[in-house]
Image (cartoon, helix red, strand yellow):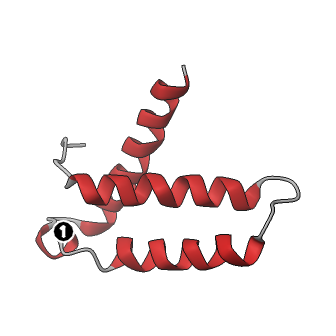
Amino acid sequence: MDVTDFPDDLVQTQAAWNATYDALAAPRPSDTTALRRRLLRLSARLWWHPYWDTARSAPAARTELRQLTRARRAVQAA
């Protein structure tokens, strides 16, 4: 897959979405209502980001964005 240059704000939003999802998926999360609302807000920001209007193949780019943020998080954790 081609390397795509994602805008920084899009990568940060995806990373925040991943962190929020992980927090919500953890056993006995605190304040699930706030986490769900945050996840919904972040999902809307991701879905409607202007970058997707210019992406050649939005579904493939969305997958690549998710993989990129997971890989960056794994590198930071190591």
Which residue position is annotated with label 1? 51
State which quarter of the image contains the C terminus. Answer: top right
Residue displayed at 54% across by 79% down: 40
Q: Nearer the viewer, residue 63 or 71?
A: 71
Q: Secondary structure at mark 1?
A: helix
Residue 43: % across, % down = 46, 74
Q: Residue furthest right?
A: 28
Q: Quadrant of residue 9?
A: bottom left
Residue 33: % across, % down = 73, 78
Q: Quadrant of residue 51?
A: bottom left
Q: Nearer the viewer, residue 69 or 23?
A: 23
Task: Give the vertical position of 63 relative to 42 (above or below).
Answer: above
Q: Quadrant of residue 56?
A: bottom left
Please state if 75 lies on the left or on the right of 8 as rendered.
right
Please state if 78 lies on the left or on the right of 53 as rendered.
right
Residue displayed at 48% across by 36% down: 73
Task: Give the vertical position of 16 relative to 74 (above or below).
Answer: below
State which quarter of the image contains the N terminus. Answer: top left
Q: Residue furthest left?
A: 54
Residue displayed at 18% across by 47% down: 4
Q: Nearer the viewer, residue 67 or 15?
A: 15
Residue displayed at 34% across by 61% down: 62
